[in-house]
Amino acid sequence: MKTPSPGIMAAGLIGLTGIILVSIGAPSSRKAPAPISETSEPAPPTSVSARGFSLASTSVDLPVDEATYPDGPHANVINANCTSCHSASMALTQPSLSADQWKATVTKMRKVYKAPVAEKDVDAIVAYLIAMPSQKAAPATGKAQDPDPKAAPGVSGGTG
């Protein structure tokens, strides 16, 4: 079999492109999709079953928590770093911890959970956390969970 010349191949490609474009039609000839209504009911959960296992999809409405850390020294550092992963309420409701316990918690966030926190910001974050009013109200009585940054997190996810 003889290989077709580049001119014949180009003509064939142009012809095929033309056929495809004609079959698709003009953009104005297509019907626009119906807009999604905010009041429409969500689709019922779907499920997949195989070999005795079933997986079902579901919809979860998460609470909206737009709170930020209150003003104070290093508030900008903690708002820029910590709220990228969790709400301010998460830390503001923790039991009173010592500086070492907070440092272990922040280190765990960096090392175990891979939080995008720069090493230079750790001391500022710890300083803010120990200066929170809820931390000053009582002596440190909480337990820093997984204080060893190499320790795998527990099932509950730990503090923070």
Image: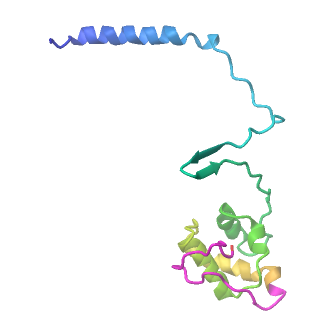
Nearer-the-camera pick, 22 or 55: 55
Nearer-the-camera pick, 68 or 15: 15
Number of residue marks: 0
Point out residue 6 in the picture as x, y percentages from the top left corner: 23, 13
Question: Which quarter of the rendered picture does the N terminus lie within?
Answer: top left
Q: Residue furthest front?
A: 52
Point out residue 43 in the picture as x, y percentages from the top left corner: 74, 38
Left or right of residue 150: residue 55: right
Q: Using the image, determine if residue 39 lies above or below residue 142.
A: above
Left or right of residue 147: residue 17: left
* Residue 137 located within the stretch drawn in magenta: yes
Specify start and end residues of the magenta stretch as a single range: 136-159
Residue 87 sits in quarter: bottom right
Residue 127 sits in quarter: bottom right
Which residue corresponds to the image point at 74% horizontal and 52% vertical from the top-left?
A: 60
Which residue corresponds to the image point at 56% horizontal and 70% vertical from the top-left?
A: 118
Magenta span: chief secondary structure: loop
Residue 149 sits in quarter: bottom right
Nearer-the-camera pick, 71 or 28: 28
Point out residue 30 in the picture as x, y percentages from the top left corner: 63, 14
Q: Using the image, determine if residue 111 lies above or below residue 131.
A: above
Left or right of residue 11: residue 4: left
